[in-house]
Every structure is written in C-alpha cells, then in structure tokens.
Amino acid sequence: MDDFNLNIPMHGEARTRVTGENTALKFGSGKVDVFGTPAMIALMEEASINTVDKNLPDGYATVGTELNIKHIAATPEGMNVTASAELIKIDGRKLTFKVEAFDEAEKIGEGSHQRYIIELDRFRDRARNKSLK
C-alpha cells in the first residue's frame, strides 16, 4: 500500500506540564530539576505521531528512525510545554518533520525528526521473531 493520505504541509501538536516525572534529574540525563531532553524529544515525537498517524489506514503506524534535536533553553517545574511538528517531506514511507518545542516564555527546542510508515502486524512479527544468537 502506498496511498497513505498524507500531504505537505500537515501539522500536529502535543502538550505536557513539567513535573518531577519528566525532569532531567528523573531521566538521569542531568542533575537539575528542569524539563529533561528525553522528555522534550518524546513530546516532539508525540507531536509528529499526532500529525500523521490518524490519517493512516487501519493496521499502519509510524516509528521514529532519526532525530536531530537542539535543546536550547531550560524549563522549570510547573510550566507548560507545547511541541509542534510539521510534515515537510514525504519520500515513500519515510517522513520528515520540522519539530519545535516552546514553554510559556520562549522556544526551548528545535530540529528535525524522521519517521517511517510500518505495517503493524508485520513489524510486530519481525520484532517477536528476532533471536539473540
């Protein structure tokens, strides 16, 4: 299947509030209690998923394959963060997004993210059948 009902540009968002559960300290990615880079990346991925996955046929989804992200400003606990994604390129099943993240005061992150359209059952079967040799 190659007709995935996707167009350029498409946009999506994801939101969260900074709590003790998504800080750099909690993720082990730093020693401060500010919004962690892994949490920001996950929010950017969620925004990308929200951009396209709802348009895919039943039995299809996307998986992340590449990230090029800058975390440019710290966000303290209690602030809200919004990530936005814009689909900027479609190359067969490979999708490229421009992603950004903002807290209530400023832009805190930016970059690009690639996802690949997969057939869920086939993907799950290959992952389950992977053996450790």
Image (cartoon, helix red, strand yellow):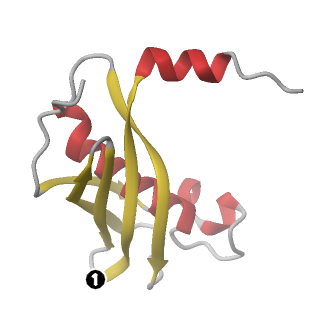
Measuring from the top left, give residue 61's x and y in whole percent.
Answer: 35, 30
Image position of 52 with respect to 111: above or below: above
Q: Position of residue 110 (x, y in %)?
A: 36, 75
At 21% across and 29% down in the image, what residue appears? 56
Q: Is residue 67 left or right of residue 54?
A: right
Q: In this view of the protein, which residue sits in the foreground, 91 or 70?
A: 91
Q: Quadrant of residue 125?
A: top right
Residue in view at x 48 percent, y 81 percent: 74
- Residue 50, by quadrant, is top left
Inspect this view and state whether residue 36 appears.
no
Compared to residue 124, the image places residue 105 above or below, namely below
Q: Amino acid at mark 1?
A: Ala
Residue that mark 1 sits on: 105
Task: Look at 89% across and 27% down and name the residue there.
Answer: 133
Whether residue 55 is situated above or below residue 70 in the rendered picture: above
Residue extending furthest toward the right: 133
Where does the image place residue 29, in percent across and percent down from the top left?
A: 68, 68
Which residue is more in the foreground, 125 or 84? 125
**Residue 76, x across and y down, in percent:** 47, 75
Q: How many marks?
A: 1
- Asked if residue 85 shows in the view, the reply is yes
